[in-house]
Amino acid sequence: MRSILKNYNSQVILRIGILLPAALFLVYDLITDAALEGEFASTHFIIEAIVFLFVLVVLIISLRDLADLRTRLQRERTRNKALAGELAAGIEVQMDGWKLTPSEREIAWMIIKGYRFAEIAELRQVKENTTRLQATALYAKAGVHGRGEFVAEIIHHLLAPVLEDSSSDEVHPARRE
């Protein structure tokens, strides 16, 4: 959704970028035609005035669309932030259940984020072997055998309520038996 909004935002900004100079030129040309050349009631002036009105209407609509788009984008950002908070809270509940130490928690979050053991060790300023041992301990507490199973276990617990609420009679591929 966000990429769609950003793409549409770019289109609206481009439209405004094209229409604004055209509108300014038409205003200048209408003033010049009316004041300096005395063409106030000529066919040429009337046609330019009509074109200016159409450009102005499209420009106003584009500005309104841009304002609406920015409001929608901000609403999506707020919604995503709230959902991310709920997701993090759900993961924290799982970690509480596994009784992870603060170090194991820190490593767990980095694993979830996709960091490699070498990167985790560097960030924590410890040896990679220490990080691997702590990861092995947190895997044992979570009842899994590795990084992939650990992340899958977290996702499974987060999705379990959704899968249980599913009204479909089909067996969902992510559902564990």
Image (cartoon, rainbow, N blue to C red):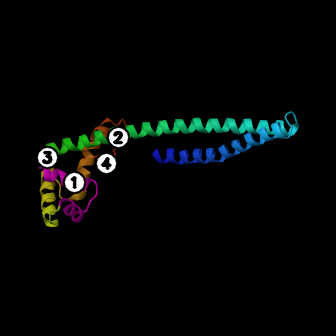
Q: Kindly identify which residue carries mark 4.
A: 174
Where residue 84 appears, as percent x and y from the top left, is 32, 42
Amino acid on which disc 2 is placed: Lys
Where residue 34 appears, as percent x and y from the top left, is 82, 36
Please state which of residues 131 and 169 is positioned toward the viewer in this rendering: 131
Q: Nearer the viewer, mark 4 or mark 3?
A: 3
Amino acid on which disc 1 is placed: Phe
Residue contact between numbered discs 2 and 4, judged by CB atoms under 8 Å: no
Where residue 30 appears, as percent x and y from the top left, is 78, 39
Alpha-carbon neighbours of circle 2 within 10 Å: few (<14), some, or many (≥20)?
A: few
The stretch of residues the image draws in magenta is 100-124
Amino acid on which disc 4 is placed: Ala
Residue 150 marker: 1
Judging from the image, what secondary structure is the residue with disc 2 in? Answer: helix
Distance in Å between CA atoms under marks 1 and 4: 15 Å
The residue shown at (78%, 36%) is 49
Residue contact between numbered discs 1 and 2, judged by CB atoms under 8 Å: no
Residue 81 marker: 2
* Main secondary structure type of the part rendered in magenta: helix
Residue 138 found in image quarter: bottom left
Q: Residue furthest front?
A: 36
The residue shown at (67%, 44%) is 19
Judging from the image, what secondary structure is the residue with disc 1 in? Answer: helix
